Amino acid sequence: MMEYPLTLKNLLMRNRQLFGKKEVVSRNLTGDFRYTYRDFYQRVCKLANVLTSLDIKKGDKVATLAWNTHRHLELYFAVPCCGAVLHTLNLRLSREHLAYIINHAEDKVIVVDEDLVPLLESIRDQISTVKHFIVLDDTGNMPYTGLEPVYSYEQSLAKAPDHYDFPDIDEWSPAAMCYTSATTGNPKGVVYTHRGLFLHAMALTNADSMGLSEKDILMPVVPMFHVNAWGTPFAAVWVGSTLIMPGKKLDPPSLCQLIEQEKVTASPGVPTIWMGIAQLLESGAQYQLSSLRALVSGGAPLPEALIRKLDKFNIPVMHAYGMTETTPLVLVSNPKSYMNSLSVEEKYRLGSRQGLLVPGLEMKVIGENGQEIPWDGKQIGELWLRGPWIAKEYYKEPETSRETFVDGWMRTGDIVNVDEEGYVLIVDRAKDLIKSGGEWISSVDLENTIMGHDAVVETAVIAIPHEKWQERPLACVVLKESEIEKVSKQDILDFLRERVAKWWIPDEIIFVNQIPKTSTGKFSKRIIREMYRNRELQQQ
Ligand code: ADP
């Protein structure tokens, strides 16, 4: 066989040859913008010329601080295809962490959305490696800014030549990088090679995973700054899906309106977003959403109650699991062909499992005794992974890397069980499991059960220290507004008594207005633990 490099250039060129007529729609600050992939390619060439004129060389880091828009998509291809490295900055990180990752990655250029300029200005004094700033000027007016030297994206593109010869690149070269949002310490960087992104994009198009295809109208709601919007923009451009970029307005009405308007078929995002849509529909709002073949839910557990709620509106949900370190696709929940006869209840239960390992990866599950556990749907252990799109280290962090990357495997830190059919269930993050009287309680399982109560919007369960039992569960519960006066803590406990073992019943239920979220929209158990500590102190 030929020695053929697996690089993003192949993705871009296939799109150029085959899908010039297909469209990208972007919800920008100034309204909806629409163009074809033919125009997209031309602007990618212009952008590559702009980067070259700024002396961006192979391996230089070009950072983006931006929403999901057509301009961000142009950067996704122009930066890696001219040999540089795309560093997507999570705009919801703390200022301190943002400055840290810019310095740690040694970003040379930062390309920033017009409305995020003030955020960047606020850390300008703390960042030392950046030589140029480019503003994604949507309104046609450059904002007044202290950033320097600064250029207008649109004006730079307008002046740049149309033609660019994309170089041949070694497939092992870095193409992109992303930092995990740190729960403790500083964020850790993961570098994605061209080869890893290529093979991962191929996995996304596999019919037994997400099955992305030319027929799809894909709307990535998961931010492009979070694990490359799960790699979906790369795969979509490759296979010529229509792309709908939702911009910064991610509230349920805006998303539903966009799905209806553009007839979106597939959309990846975290469960909190889909929860919002379910609530909106339950409140009686009317949208035509029948074009959807899958809302892809990942990044956090998908409660069975949410699958049920969406099913009431004929909206199918596809459960997926992954991490920043795994590019991220690892597991996808699709029933096997001979499971058609499963009852609806069994299908819901299966759907709340994270699913089957996607082709191309290897997994093993290591129990407390260091041995692989049997696949019996009961015994638990830590999920270990290896494969062509699994990271082998954290960027410039040899010490931390040694804990996570062991003997050619990556330890996920996620505790799972696997049923006889190979469907994996993420029982908990190792650090969130509750150890009570020597037995494990899954905080995720408790959350999912509580969320099955009709009056509950969302809930997060954490461990609190206990003299006798070591740890006991505490549940923070958000009730539907209409139920606040009607439902008591006792009602929630009674509901649980019928559904979980007695010793799993939380020692305390606290009603809260909302669950604090991380920068990527997941429940922040760290903040909840801190909140509870304060509460305890106040009580003493
Ligand atoms: P962060 O650590 O910043 O939240 P990641 O996206 O890398 O960012 O988080 C990966 C973690 O999210 C996984 O290790 C796992 O604990 C959790 N996770 C991802 N997808 C799922 C899922 N479908 N169900 C349960 N947990 C999930």
Image (spheres, rainbow, N blue to C red):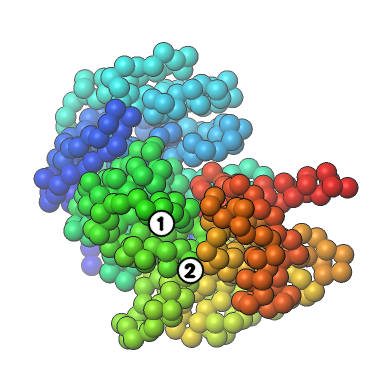
Could you tell me how far apart the alpha carbons at marks 2 and 1 are, in whole angstroms?
Answer: 16 Å
| Above/below status of 312 relative to 525 | below
Task: Please give the name of the residue rendered at 49% of the width and 39% of the height, measured from the top-left corner.
Answer: 90
Q: Which residue is mark 2?
A: 304
Q: Circle 2 — which element?
A: helix
Task: Please give the name of the residue rendered at 68% of the width and 68% of the height, measured from the top-left corner.
Answer: 493
Q: How many neighbours does mark 1 have within 10 angstroms: few (below 14), some (14-19), or many (20 or more)?
A: some
Q: How many neighbours does mark 2 have within 10 angstroms: few (below 14), some (14-19), or many (20 or more)?
A: many
Task: Tally the numbered discs.
Answer: 2
- Kind of residue indicated by mark 1: Glu
| Residue 204 drawn at (x, y percent) | 32, 61
Q: Which residue is mark 1?
A: 282
- Kind of residue indicated by mark 2: Glu
Task: Please give the name of the residue rendered at 58% of the width and 69% of the height, measured from the top-left corner.
Answer: 449
Using the image as rendered, state which of residue 486 and residue 422 is in the foreground. 486
Image quadrant containing the N terminus? bottom left
Q: Circle 1 — which element?
A: helix
